[in-house]
Image (tube, rainbow, N blue to C red):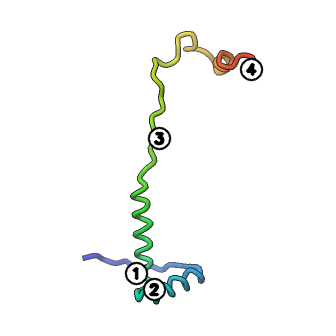
Amino acid sequence: MMTRMKTTVDLPDELFREVQHLARAENTTMRSLMEEGLRAVIARHHAAGRFTLRDASVPGDGVSAQFADATWAQLREAAYGDRL
């Protein structure tokens, strides 16, 4: 058995009228339409899942010995030289 919680929902007047009109047209209740809408949003979020960044690392052994203690300025100079 499913328990129910009562709550108050504050809707813009235009949305309220649209939901009311749709409920009448579909011979259902506003509560049923809102429940259906909330379930659809929840399902969409579950289907989307969590974003996972792909592993874009490159092979190798890390920084070469000549740059192990280099500053950012030294690394930038080695990479770009006088092109800055």
Badge 4 marks a residue whose secondary structure is helix
Viewer-proximal residue, 16 or 22?
22
Badge 2 marks a residue whose secondary structure is helix
11 vs 71: above or below: below
Q: CA distance from mark 3 to mark 4?
A: 32 Å
**Residue at 45 percent of width and 38 percent of height:** 54
Residue assigned mark 2 = 23
**Residue at 51 percent of width and 87 percent of height:** 21
- What label does residue 53 carry, if any? 3
Q: Are marks 1 and 2 in contact (CB under 8 Å)?
A: yes
Q: Position of residue 33 (x, y in %)?
A: 43, 79
- What label does residue 32 carry, if any? 1
Q: Earlier in the sequence, mark 3 or mark 1?
A: 1
Dot 4 alpha-carbon crowd within 10 angstroms: few under 14, some 14 to 19, many 20 or more: few
Which residue type does callout 1 highlight?
A: Ser
Residue assigned mark 4 = 83
Dot 3 alpha-carbon crowd within 10 angstroms: few under 14, some 14 to 19, many 20 or more: few
Which residue type does callout 4 highlight?
A: Arg
Left or right? Give the position of 7 relative to 71. left
Q: Earlier in the sequence, mark 4 or mark 1?
A: 1
